[in-house]
Image (cartoon, rainbow, N blue to C red):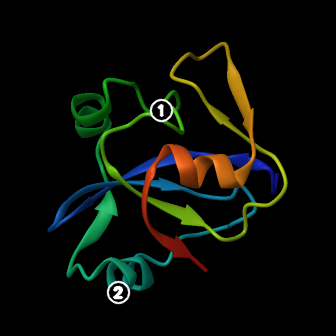
Amino acid sequence: MGQTAPTLILKTDMGYFVFIVSGNRDKLDFVKIADILGCSKVKLASPKEVQKVTGFEVGNVRMVGLDLPCVLDKKLFEYVFGGTGKSTCSLKIEPQALIELNHVVSIFE
C-alpha cells in the first residue's frame, strides 16, 4: 500500500492542485494542507471538476504531465505505482522523477 500513489485533485481558494498521496495514509488533514499551500479553503474536487481540469475521470488521473501545481506526500519512497490516464495501465516511477516531471510546490509531511 505504501507504494501506491493515488493522484487527487484539490480545489482551493487559490485554484486547483494535484496531490500525489501515499496509499499508506489513512486520512488527509485538509487544515494542514491549506496551511502549507497558504489557502483558506481546501477540499477534494468533484468528479466533474476533475474531468474538467485534467481531462481524466476520477481514478484514472495520471501522476505526471498535468498543468497544475503539485504537492507530493513525503511518505512516498523507493518506487511509486500510480495512474497513467488509462484505467488498464499503471506507472512505476521513482519519487525523484515525480519531482522532476511535475511543478512541485510543496512536500506534505
Q: Residue at x 20, y 82 (%)?
A: 40
Q: Position of residue 63 (x, y in %)?
A: 54, 39
Up-down: is 37 above or below 78?
below
In this picture, residue 2 sits left or right of residue 99: right
Secondary element at image label 1: loop
Residue positioned most to the front = 100
Other-residue count near label 2 (Cα within 10 Å), few / some / many at <14 / 14–19 / ≥20: few
| Residue closest to the eye, 68 or 61 | 68
Up-down: is 34 above or below 52?
below
> For residue 104, which quarter of the picture?
bottom left
In this picture, residue 99 sits left or right of residue 56: right
Residue that label 2 marks: 35
Q: Amino acid at mark 1?
A: Val
Q: Residue at x 76, y 62 (%)?
A: 24
Secondary element at image label 2: helix
Residue that label 1 marks: 61
Using the numbered discs, state the Cα–Cα distance from disc 1 to disc 2 in whole angstroms.
25 Å
**Contact, CB < 8 Å: mark 1 with mark 2?**
no
Q: Amino acid at mark 2?
A: Asp
Q: Position of residue 60 (x, y in %)?
A: 51, 27
Q: Position of residue 88 (x, y in %)?
A: 66, 13
In this picture, residue 31 sits left or right of residue 107: left
> For residue 13, which quarter of the picture?
bottom left
| Residue closest to the eye, 58 or 93 | 93
Q: For residue 89, which numbered disc appears in the image?
A: none
Work out whether mark 1 precedes mark 2 in sequence or the reverse, and give the earlier one: 2
| Residue closest to the eye, 51 or 62 | 62
Q: Quarter of the image for the C terminus: give it.
A: bottom right
Q: Residue at x 82, y 47 (%)?
A: 79
Q: Residue at x 49, y 78 (%)?
A: 29
